[in-house]
Image: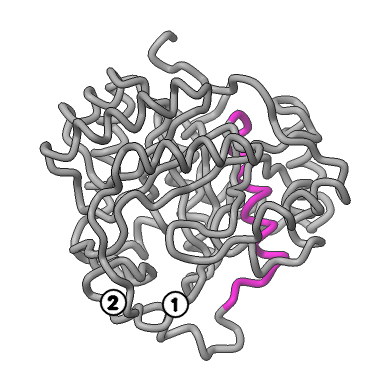
Amino acid sequence: MIRTDWTRDEIAALFDLPFGELVFRAQTVHRKHHAPDQVQMSTLLSIKTGGCPEDCGYCNQSVHAETGLKATKLMDVRAVLQAAAQAKDNGSSRFCMGAAWRNPKDRDMPAIVEMVKGVRQMGMETCMTLGMLTPAQADMLADAGLDYYNHNIDTSPERYGEVITTRSFEDRLDTLEHVRTAGINVCCGGIVGMGETRGDRVGFIHALATLPRHPESVPVNALVPVRGTVLGDMLADTPLAKIDEIEFVRTVAVARITMPESMVRLSAGRESMSDSTQALCFMAGANSIFTGDKLLTTGNAGDDADAALFAKLGLTPLQGDTVMQVAAE
């Protein structure tokens, strides 16, 4: 029985466990639901960069940020499919496509649908993150065969308004509901290291772990401070701004324990983590990463570094069809 009734006190108690005990519990849960030595490799491509009207304090693609990032139009479908083919050749089994929109326009949907269909035909899982969706748009993506839709809650409900003011936490939940209703798997996580407290991290995990159905993918990002963004300017010169690596591992472990069947993904910030920290994250139940040299617009570890890390740790890329078809249940 998968619990969705976690209390904040229970989650806070997990965070407070001695580190070895917490990782042991997380690894025990992980082995009950996942192959212990396999990690899913995903590739993320920005199919439309910059110019987003949202004011997310961490994002260099916001029009409110002053980072010098040049806005682009939606990529040509053929170019996207070429990038997907290269990602598959490099070992990725899931191809994720992100557009810097508040929400997609209906005129953009035909091209988006063709991207989904084309990547699916290559035998890869597909994921899109396009901002907020209407029920009709979610249905179009479902009809195209989209496997996952990413829409992060970012942080705890209480801290959300300090990070983003142009849409509410409830707006996020509405889109997740539209995605679920359409029969698409949910990818939903957030960002730590934004100056939040452990209580906020408890609230972040609690919000995910008490959804009617847990997200099938839970990306855990460590903030990459970018000059010109609100949080980047606030935290870049603060020595203690970067989240403590043990605390990051604790967050991964608590996510694994409370959402045992989810793929827990190490996302942004991994390029600055040591091999030892990443190894601890895998021990704590992380079993998915973004590979490649770039995540949307920020740096990533790169394929060669990931291959070397996998060899060092005895990990292998997850193979085969891992999609959980919620529509069929």
Residue hosting label 1: 226
Type of amino acid under label 2: Ala
Q: 13 above or below 94?
A: below
Main SS of the magenta part reads: helix
Identify the element where label 2 is drawn: loop
Image side of residue 110 versus residue 25, left or right? left
Range of magenta residues: 242-261
Which residue lies at the image location 66% right of the left edge and 37% below the top edge? 91
* Quadrant for the C terminus in the image: top left
Can residue 154 be found in the magenta stretch? no
Nearer to us in this view, 260 or 150: 150
Can residue 251 be found in the magenta stretch? yes
Q: 158 above or below 87?
A: below
Mark 2 closeness class: few <14, some 14–19, many ≥20 residues within 10 Å: many
Mark 1 closeness class: few <14, some 14–19, many ≥20 residues within 10 Å: many
* Residue 93 position within the rendered picture, expressed as x and y whole percent measured from the top left: 59, 32
Which residue lies at the image location 22% right of the left edge and 47% below the top edge? 171
Residue hosting label 2: 65
**Residue 188 in view here:** yes
* Residue 296 position within the rendered picture, expressed as x and y whole percent measured from the top left: 43, 57
Asked if disc 1 and disc 2 are in contact, CB closer than 8 Å, the reply is yes
Identify the element where label 1 is drawn: loop
* Residue 256 position within the rendered picture, expressed as x and y whole percent measured from the top left: 64, 41
